[in-house]
Image (spheres, rainbow, N blue to C red):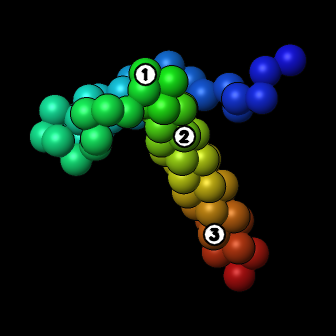
Amino acid sequence: MSDKPEVSEYYKRQAKDLTNLLFDKRFLNDELSRESIDWLEDYIGFLFESQSNMSAKCAVLTASLRNKK
């Protein structure tokens, strides 16, 4: 059993692109280990997917509340 949450490939790709940009522009320390960068990619992907899921649920809830009036 993995301690990492499952993140869809779409959000993993977005996280990888952002992490690469941060590294290329030297916002990240050059001495970071590959393990640290992988962790950061996983975390950013999780945040992107979580935010998207919360937004979708909020939209559904808001629509259902509007329909009750």
**Label 1 Cα neighbours within 10 Å, binned few <14 / some 14-19 / many ≥20:** few
| Numbered disc 2: secondary structure | helix
Q: Amino acid at mark 2?
A: Tyr
Marking on residue 34: 1
Marking on residue 26: none
Residue under label 2 = 43
Residue 64 horizontal side relative to residue 17, left or right:
right
Viewer can see residue 14: no
Residue under label 3 = 62
Question: Of callouts 2 and 1, which one flags the residue occurring earlier in the amino acid sequence?
Answer: 1
Question: Of callouts 3 and 2, which one flags the residue occurring earlier in the amino acid sequence?
Answer: 2
Residue 67: where, in percent of width, then height?
Answer: 68, 70
Q: Residue at x 60, y 28 (%)?
A: 7
Residue 22 horizontal side relative to residue 8, left or right:
left
Residue 18 horizontal side relative to residue 55, left or right:
left
The quarter of the picture where residue 33 lies is: top left
Q: Quadrant of the C terminus?
A: bottom right
Tally the marks. Answer: 3
Outermost residue on the right side: it is 1
Q: Are marks 2 and 1 in contact (CB under 8 Å)?
A: no
